[in-house]
Amino acid sequence: FNPVAIDAFSWGDLLYGVPYATENVALIYNKSVVPEVPATFEALLALAKQLTVLDAGKYGFLIQEPDPFHTFALHTAGGGYIFGKDADGVLNPCDLGLDNAGSIAGAIILDQMVKDGIEIAGAGYNEVTGAFNAGNLAMMIGGPWTLPGAKAGGIDYGVAAIPPIRGNAPGVFVGVQGFMISAFSENKVLANLFVKDFLISSDVMLGLYIQGDRPPAYLPALAFLAGNEDIQGFAAAAATAVPMPKIAEMGSVWSAWSAALELIVNQAQDPTTAMQDAAAEIRALLGCE
């Protein structure tokens, strides 16, 4: 299995389910404009700046905002994180990493993208995908759910891992689908046999892929799809992905984090202060002051 998928279904040293699919964002690019993915994120931004002609409605690279799910890679590349873990591998909500040096470094990159005219305010989901599907955007960060629109627009697209940022592989959020057995099951033995002897097979996992169009978490099934460039591109991005924190405290993170990103993109606050204020607000909500 993909190690990140196993991690997503684990708590401490215990595995609570069997994963079958992963879901994450990656770099999606227009091959007619960008034949090859730049080797580094810095080269990507330099190319994006060349391709951006705002008066003509042409954009080199956009990140959907203010959306932490899509900007997370900027933070993780420098060592940013949401919640740290204790010695037993259990998430610690009071070990918040949104205002550490790595997270702030990512916010500074976003701020510089705005100053360089690459990222623009108001670049929401519809604006970003609409521009890409119309051939007016060369590169974006997006998930599998964006591909039908690109196909309908006749875009010759590619999917790849986001290039290294300052020499470090960025980690995107990954969601993982899987099977768990209820503690209230009336036939746990049969349910366990069904999961272990039937579900864990390439045939079943490939069938689930056909129905859900998401990269299999089961590596033998993923190997069968070696010729599928979309699946392999998202899988490459998932190789360094970070499971979405599976604790209730994550619900207290999104609003303050999104607000910080919006302040940065609108140039209403410097990135360091924005991230520090967001982290302070989250700590207060969690009672971690």
Image (cartoon, helix red, strand yellow):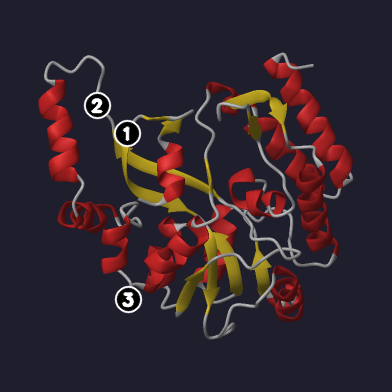
Residue 88 at x, y = what percent?
A: 56, 26
Residue 27 at x, y = what percent?
A: 56, 66
In the image, taking residue 156 as reference, residue 240 lies left or right, namely: right
Q: Amino acid at mark 3?
A: Gly
In the rendered view, would you say 196 is above or below 110?
Answer: above
Chain-order first, disc 1 or disc 3: 1
Residue found 52% across the figure and 73% down from its top: 134
* Mark 2 and mark 3: Cα distance apart in space: 34 Å
Chain-order first, disc 2 or disc 1: 1
Residue 171 at x, y = what percent?
A: 60, 53
Residue found 73% across the figure and 76% down from its top: 43
> Between 33 and 178, which is closer to the camera in this rendering?
178
* Mark 1 and mark 3: Cα distance apart in space: 29 Å
Chain-order first, disc 2 or disc 3: 2
> Between 82 and 152, which is closer to the camera in this rendering?
82
* Residue denoted by label 3: 227
Asked which secondary structure carries label 1, the reply is: loop
In the image, taking residue 173 as reference, residue 260 lies left or right, namely: right
Residue 217 at x, y = what percent?
A: 35, 51
Q: Amino acid at mark 1?
A: Gly
Q: Which of the labelled discs sits on residue 17, or is there none?
A: 1
| Pointers 2 and 1 in contact (C-beta within 8 Å) | yes
Query: Residue 278 occupies which quadrant of the picture?
Result: top right
Asked which secondary structure carries label 2, the reply is: loop
Q: Which of the labelled discs sits on residue 181, or is there none?
A: 2
| Pointers 2 and 3 in contact (C-beta within 8 Å) | no
